[in-house]
Amino acid sequence: MIRFSVLGCGRIGTMHARNLARHPKARLTSVFDVVTKASDAMAAELGVKAAVSVEEVLADPEVDAVLIATSTDTHVDLITAAARAGKAILCEKPIALDMAKVERCWAEIKGLNATVMIGFNRRFDPSFRAVHDRLNKGEIGKLEQIVITSRDPAPPPISYINVSGGLFRDMTIHDFDLARYFAGDVVEVHAFGGHLVDPAIAAAGDIDAAMVTLRAASGALIHINNSRRCAYGYDQRLEVFGEKGMLLAGNKTATTVQSFSATGTAEGDVVLPFFIERYAEAYANEVAHFVDSISGGTTPLTSFTDGAEALRLADAALESLRSGRAVKIG
Amino acid sequence: MIRFSVLGCGRIGTMHARNLARHPKARLTSVFDVVTKASDAMAAELGVKAAVSVEEVLADPEVDAVLIATSTDTHVDLITAAARAGKAILCEKPIALDMAKVERCWAEIKGLNATVMIGFNRRFDPSFRAVHDRLNKGEIGKLEQIVITSRDPAPPPISYINVSGGLFRDMTIHDFDLARYFAGDVVEVHAFGGHLVDPAIAAAGDIDAAMVTLRAASGALIHINNSRRCAYGYDQRLEVFGEKGMLLAGNKTATTVQSFSATGTAEGDVVLPFFIERYAEAYANEVAHFVDSISGGTTPLTSFTDGAEALRLADAALESLRSGRAVKIG
Amino acid sequence: MIRFSVLGCGRIGTMHARNLARHPKARLTSVFDVVTKASDAMAAELGVKAAVSVEEVLADPEVDAVLIATSTDTHVDLITAAARAGKAILCEKPIALDMAKVERCWAEIKGLNATVMIGFNRRFDPSFRAVHDRLNKGEIGKLEQIVITSRDPAPPPISYINVSGGLFRDMTIHDFDLARYFAGDVVEVHAFGGHLVDPAIAAAGDIDAAMVTLRAASGALIHINNSRRCAYGYDQRLEVFGEKGMLLAGNKTATTVQSFSATGTAEGDVVLPFFIERYAEAYANEVAHFVDSISGGTTPLTSFTDGAEALRLADAALESLRSGRAVKIG
Amino acid sequence: MIRFSVLGCGRIGTMHARNLARHPKARLTSVFDVVTKASDAMAAELGVKAAVSVEEVLADPEVDAVLIATSTDTHVDLITAAARAGKAILCEKPIALDMAKVERCWAEIKGLNATVMIGFNRRFDPSFRAVHDRLNKGEIGKLEQIVITSRDPAPPPISYINVSGGLFRDMTIHDFDLARYFAGDVVEVHAFGGHLVDPAIAAAGDIDAAMVTLRAASGALIHINNSRRCAYGYDQRLEVFGEKGMLLAGNKTATTVQSFSATGTAEGDVVLPFFIERYAEAYANEVAHFVDSISGGTTPLTSFTDGAEALRLADAALESLRSGRAVKIG
């Protein structure tokens, strides 16, 4: 039984806390949030302790692992402190918005042998996972091309944009990780950005749409398209093309219903609205994998290094956007 | 080169005449219609002779074969006369609305060795044909169940209903033939009819919807559903279920376009409107098969007997409707 | 908080017990099974009491409601005893295999004002429910036809066939209930049965495939097809056709993955294997509805009467099978 | 009636000649090929004259228009000569492999008022056309992103690669034109190329896979992916994403059959093998549009300028491949 504390009781922290509370090999010991009302509510709902400080959590011998779902600017300090306190760590992406900070963090913790996992939920989606496994079993031969479609239903508030690190570090970072999951190391990045959705985002210095292309060390080519708005819901598709065929993973809908009318046929539901619904199974699988990694003493599938490398690609995409050149990695 | 005359220049006759005019091994010699204006127009369009009488056509040594697309009440006389004149015959379904008449016709012509084909177009649809061939190659093992969906886009005028012989002889007859194509001899028929579409059809003594179930000699069970109205177009689907799997053949649309919006996803076009469009390839294949049958001296896939047997099932369905019993055949 | 005891710790009872244990407004108090090992295991897993007798359960003031998942032959006695003990009752279908027994049970309990729900899980499937709600909101106008496909992946053992009451009472009963859910009262039933899957089932006096057709009081026509075997999994589809369009509800698969190869395109996963997986959401919704019905003092959506009426249709289908006639109801 | 001569009796010329022979407002007068056997065969099949030289064709007053389907290196000279001879011209893409040559050709002919059309068949595909029309009617609001998938079933022989001008000028040129059809002027191009299919293609100095990204003057972003090999057939898909939704156009298959088995569900046919089959309707529409343009004296939808601009994008992609930079246009 792995005993957990969840740090951060926002939307994602709440979801993780509920998943941990339900997991047969995990026990939720406490939750913490700087907003006391939030941690109190979650503690009450799940019948656990509301810790009053991070220090209390990290000093608690009844806590084996922390799940960090606080704001991005706190991640590095919390990871470092938790690693020093001997806790296993599952931290939401991104580790930080600044590569130097990520590297300093790694320098601090790498000798501590902490189990550290970064929350790239998509690797735990059953459909993406199935594509990965079937590719690796050789079903479509050598990997040649990947197309990742990743469009949010609606843009976040500008206040969020301002602290997000920009579209590549905030949103595309998931797609960069997915690209690495399928194609391994990436050696070259090109990006076009767009101001297509909301002029306020441009005014905040960010882009709201992008088309990024990657070249993997293996020679495989990867395309990612992003938009901060998508009329039909949260568009999360994957196309993996190889010498012997192709595997697609599509969107999820609430029902299998199709309608036929005088104006069209086989119309399905809109896709599930956003990540909490779309990746519900993935999030449950993610914490289960973390629990297994701690129990087994193994490095999680989405390691600290994966978090760092995805940020490196985000930074490279940003540099490409600015320079107009494809940027080489490593 | 097989030389043809088309009798009947309505919608179906026109379509057949154009297909014959385009076929490399067929030559259209003449067309005939009791409405002179219709035959003149078709003759002008296709650059052929407008015959002034059936007698002229049947006496013409330049005519090897006739395609009969006149009204149903003329079919038997035309088949008989054409067979006597030594012409090959492709006659639109149904042969007649009265089984006794069909049997007398057969008694007249069976000794004449005429090539006689009844126009059951659906057997020549590439998708239905592919299902048939894959079934017969054993892809889904032993045939167990068939579901035939056959819904017209809109009811015909009451004037047509009045001379149609009723839904089973006019519309379901195609489905009966399709059932026989896949499952062979049918031994038992049950039918429910409905008055769901237009009270004027009920007033004319006919039904406008039906659910028919058949039992084949092989043990296979077949369901047919019919409606005289279908909001989303001409619904023509086939499900063939066997011990090792299932084969479906679906509707056809004008394009492959799918639309995604705030109200739904993957909406396709409405299905092709009616038989001329839906079965365009089937009709072309049908005349090609007839040309090959004449050339090869073989019995066409949809023989006079098939026409008679489909009518027998229609009559049995009508009897079931009246008696409330499943009706045994043969 | 509604306090529950689950009677019967087989596959379905286990699944229900886990759903109840997870439901925020339910508390599982105890479980019971004549096989002590089964109830002990479930009690241990869920941290509840293993009752040693039905009497203990019914006498327990900590039990507000019982979920009956024992063998069919015990249902009537347990319903009656539980109703007398003032418990709310959710009983798995069928109530009994004998209509007279069902009617005697009703005579016993109807004055007791117990909340009684019969476990017709399909009404709680999100897709079937969505079709129902959209139909009732008028999306496809007046209901005209329904096609229900219901095929089990593989036949049960002959020992089960022998006590099942036959295909109509055991398997089609779900489809009869679904037909009533969509089309209301049924007035006429015709059935063809088949011996297509396993000769041992025929030897046991049962059929293993069927095509049933119903006529509703509204005039709507309904077709049900059943098979005790389906190579591609548990086939559970619904087609609802109306004057303005059609709604389909399809099968569920484990992933959204589609594969494209030299031999075919867009191949999806096999469908979910059987009812526990296919109707996982439906079962959770079903117990939630029961909890709400008890809390609100309302009659559940799937009442004792619904259980009786579905059995009446099963009996009528059996009579039709024997007599070769469509059987009128009521 | 527009009278035609077809120059070049290879696979594409043959297909065009047959379409012209069937078109009600076109008449095929003659065909020509430097390989006399080819032109004789086609002339015999279609019952037209086999011209012995281009000069004979261009001097023939019975020829209003020429369809140029000869090898690429002859296009410019034939266009120029035909324009001088007062013929309307439908020339297969590309105009030439060298932009300077294209510009000189234009300088020669622009004053001659010839109707000149370049054979970008995809604009005439019913599905792509429907997407275009629905986009322009505002169905999905402002255009934001396009994803074009364009993969050939198998690479051509190296002898063809050697004279093809490279993947961008030979294959992607269609996609560049499609991008311009939907998004208008393109202002920036980036390309990654790959050697993924056949080392002999790399040895010949060409790439066999590519991912190209374009930025349109409107701000829209466009992604194109190409491969010289595709296991499941000729993959030709289009995704058009706008502020209010998305339109997809998919591949075409020979039938609508789907198969369901113990290993998968809803498997469709492989896609149509290559351009002759896939774009059969598009080619027929293309010549029909050309006939209408001549009759109406209007500029064809795919003008000489479109041919030049698509080549300009191909050249920019090649420059991007070499320089590692996104290349600005104009």
Image (spheres, coloured by chain):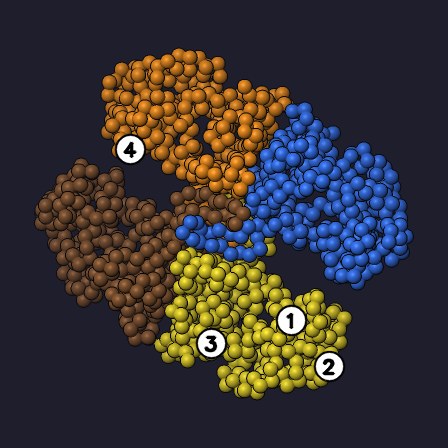
Chain colours: A yellow, B orange, C blue, D brown
Both on one chain, marks 3 and 2?
yes
Can residue C167 be seen in the rendering of this structure? yes
Which tag, 3 or 1, sits closer to the chain's start?
1
Q: Relative to residue D245, is residue D280 drawn left or right?
A: left
Q: From the image, tell me which residue sits under label 3.
A: A314
Q: Residue at x 27, y 26 (%)?
A: B2
Pair 3/2: label in front: 2
User: Mark 2 or mark 1, which is nearer the start of the sequence?
Assistant: 2
Q: In which quarter of the image is residue C185?
A: top right
Is residue A315 placed above or below B6 in the rendered structure?
below
Q: In this view, does D295 lie above or below A251?
A: above
Q: From the image, which quarter does the N terminus of chain B lie in?
A: top left
Mark 1 vs mark 2, CA separation in Å: 17 Å
Q: Are marks 3 and 1 on the same chain?
A: yes
Kindly identify the amino acid type of the residue bearing the numbered disc 4.
His
Instruction: Name the residue: 56% across, 61% down.
Output: A126
Query: Chain ID for label 4?
Result: B
